[in-house]
Image (spheres, helix red, strand yellow):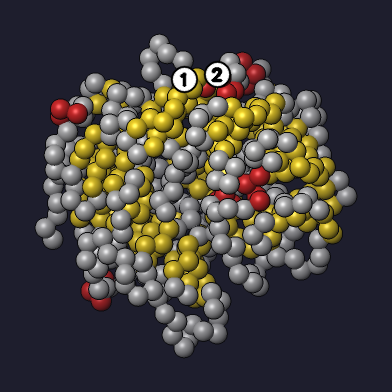
């Protein structure tokens, strides 16, 4: 949720633009799923996952969809030739290259739908969310050809509209929310589908209002349900459909906000708590105010990363800046905090204050261990974003990029950046480009510089340098209504597209390979969502 409109956006210790809001609020409760009321089994059809650690709030203005697909569609094709995997199996052979594919990097482009983020691999296929005429769908493609193997209507659920819409693969099944009606996306059934055929393996037997989207809990799909007696944690076995209450979260109004089981607990009349769930138990809880101080809440956004070697969670949450936004300007240089938390105990290890920006890189960059995770921006106290309707402009700004030690929060290197005054925050965040796995191109005071994010060393950008640029996807989803700042909206920030670019940000032909953090690799094919659609590239 959070740093609104940031390309790398997500949470906001210091929200920008129209401003972050909490998760979509819903007032209808369909089913009581307290422990005594959860059915023991659900119907079973007879016929990376990754924990979201970042949330961003979409603009409250008119939503914009991804660029119109420009590539050549491979067509949906005939599914009759698809060999079905046994339920849950992922051992089918990966795609292989035919003679016609071995001489080219780009193998195929799929543009029959508008992709909403990067794909996830499941055996020899990839799964991605898409839009067709504004209607949300889950799409499974053959990685070797780009052909649509199957497609089903989907719902984003009641999760915050700034949480990336990442596909969920659990136990070799594709898990998604199926709308129970065509009139609303609030009422859903949780489905675990065979990736080869799309046939249901497990389905919840009742219509639910799902607050937190399903995530992997070890062959279990864990999610939250809004019921008549509150919000409950529920687990579904993706192979049998059996539903059980989550013992740790049955009585807690909790949502996942980071890796390592990091939760936010918000109960009526009580201060917000941070907690860590390990298995079926809550390992620790601590008042959020003990970590970040008064005035902060995950309702205004969050961003967390886990550093396993240091056993520390590093992140930030947003502050209520409604007063500042009402005055037409959001401060960048004050009011933001970033903390390190001991994973084992929940104790705060360190706190950084004043202009700390942990949102200035696109979230897709953080999919694996990299020194890019330990990079932040820091703004001078005078820096701010001026709001004028749907227009946002950075003013009076001084900013630097810096590395930090996750164990202590100490700044390890710092590079001054060009004054971004006069540009929008979103455009500014999109000016960062990744080179390889852990280097960045940024605009220095005298022009673009290449920054080694391990050491902070800078070099002149060589002619012909190829970088990877990201573009945030903001789109309207038909029927996906939620409330932002008291107004109804169907606008969502769903993920990022990537494209090969030059240091000045202009698109260029791909001359090397995509970085590992972009898209998904299966067999000899690297599948990524680009400005042209979903594309498959030969890796060898």
Instruction: Identify the mark at residue 272; answer none if there is no mark.
Output: 1
**In this rendering, does residue 521 appear at all?**
yes
- Position of 359 with respect to 53 (left or right) is right
- Position of 58 with respect to 279 (left or right) is right
| Figure quadrant of residue 463 | bottom right
Residue 363 percent coordinates (x, y): 56, 46
Q: Residue at x 48, y 62 (%)?
A: 520
Q: Residue at x 31, y 59 (%)?
A: 172
Q: Residue at x 66, y 62 (%)?
A: 436
Residue 21 percent coordinates (x, y): 50, 27
Asked if labels 2 and 1 touch by Cβ distance under 8 angstroms, the answer is yes
Q: Residue furthest right?
A: 446
Q: Which residue is mark 2?
A: 289
In the displayed structure, 387 sits above or below 7; it is above
| Figure quadrant of residue 368 | bottom right
Residue 29 percent coordinates (x, y): 24, 26
| Figure quadrant of residue 499 | bottom right
- Position of 253 with respect to 517 (left or right) is left
- Position of 444 with respect to 281 (left or right) is right
Seen from the viewer's position, the closer of residues 144 and 303 is 303
In the displayed structure, 320 sits above or below 356; it is above
Q: Which element is circle 2 on?
A: helix
Seen from the viewer's position, the closer of residues 268 and 501 is 268
In the displayed structure, 46 sits above or below 261; it is below
The C terminus lies in which quarter of the figure? bottom right
Instruction: Identify the mark at residue 6; answer none if there is no mark.
Output: none
């Amino acid at each position: 949720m959070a740093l609104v409109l940031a390309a790398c956006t997500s949470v906001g210790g210091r929200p920008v633009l129209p401003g972050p809001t909490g998760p979509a609020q819903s007032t209808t409760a369909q089913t009581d799923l307290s422990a005594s009321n959860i059915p023991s089994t659900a119907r079973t059809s007879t016929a990376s996952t990754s924990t979201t650690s970042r949330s961003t709030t979409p603009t409250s203005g008119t939503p914009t969809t991804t660029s119109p697909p420009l590539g050549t569609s491979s067509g949906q094709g005939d599914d009759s030739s698809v060999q079905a995997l046994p339920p849950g199996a992922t051992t089918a052979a990966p795609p292989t290259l035919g003679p016609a594919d071995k001489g080219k990097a780009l193998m195929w482009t799929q543009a029959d739908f508008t992709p909403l983020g990067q794909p996830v691999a499941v055996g020899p296929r990839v799964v991605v969310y898409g839009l067709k005429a504004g209607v949300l769908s889950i799409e499974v493609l053959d990685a070797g050809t780009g052909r649509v193997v199957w497609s089903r209507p989907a719902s984003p659920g009641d999760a915050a509209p700034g949480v990336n819409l990442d596909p969920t693969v659990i136990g070799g099944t594709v898990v998604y929310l199926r709308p129970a009606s065509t009139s609303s996306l609030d009422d859903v059934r949780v489905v675990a589908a065979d990736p080869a055929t799309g046939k249901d393996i497990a389905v919840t037997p009742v219509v639910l209002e799902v607050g937190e989207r399903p995530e992997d809990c070890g062959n279990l799909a864990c999610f939250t349900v809004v019921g008549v007696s509150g919000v409950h944690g529920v687990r579904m076995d993706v192979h049998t459909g059996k539903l059980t209450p989550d013992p740790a979260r049955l009585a807690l109004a909790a949502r996942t906000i980071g890796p390592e089981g990091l939760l936010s607990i918000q109960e009526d009349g009580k201060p917000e708590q941070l907690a860590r769930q390990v298995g079926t138990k809550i390992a620790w809880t601590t008042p959020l105010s003990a970590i970040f101080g008064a005035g902060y809440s995950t309702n205004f956004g969050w961003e967390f990363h886990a550093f396993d070697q240091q056993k520390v969670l590093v992140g930030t949450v947003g502050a209520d800046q409604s007063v500042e936004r009402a005055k037409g300007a959001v401060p960048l240089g004050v009011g933001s905090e970033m903390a390190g938390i001991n994973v084992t105990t929940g104790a705060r290890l360190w706190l950084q204050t004043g202009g700390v920006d942990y949102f200035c890189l696109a979230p897709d960059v953080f999919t694996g261990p990299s020194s890019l995770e330990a990079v932040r921006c820091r703004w001078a106290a005078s820096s701010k974003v001026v709001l004028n309707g749907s227009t946002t402009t950075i003013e009076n700004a001084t900013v630097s990029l810096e590395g930090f030690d996750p164990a202590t929060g100490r700044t390890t290197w710092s590079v001054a950046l060009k004054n971004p005054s006069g540009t929008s925050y979103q455009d500014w965040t999109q000016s960062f480009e990744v080179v390889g796995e852990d280097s960045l191109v940024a605009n220095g005071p005298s022009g673009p510089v290449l920054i080694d994010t391990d050491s902070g060393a800078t070099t002149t950008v060589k002619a012909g340098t190829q970088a990877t640029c990201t573009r945030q996807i903001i789109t309207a989803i038909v029927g996906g209504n939620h409330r932002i700042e008291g107004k109804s909206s169907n606008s969502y920030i769903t993920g990022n597209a990537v494209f090969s670019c030059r240091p000045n940000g202009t698109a260029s032909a791909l001359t090397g390979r995509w970085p590992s953090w972009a898209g998904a690799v299966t067999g000899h094919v690297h599948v990524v969502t680009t400005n042209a659609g979903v594309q498959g590239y030969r890796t060898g």
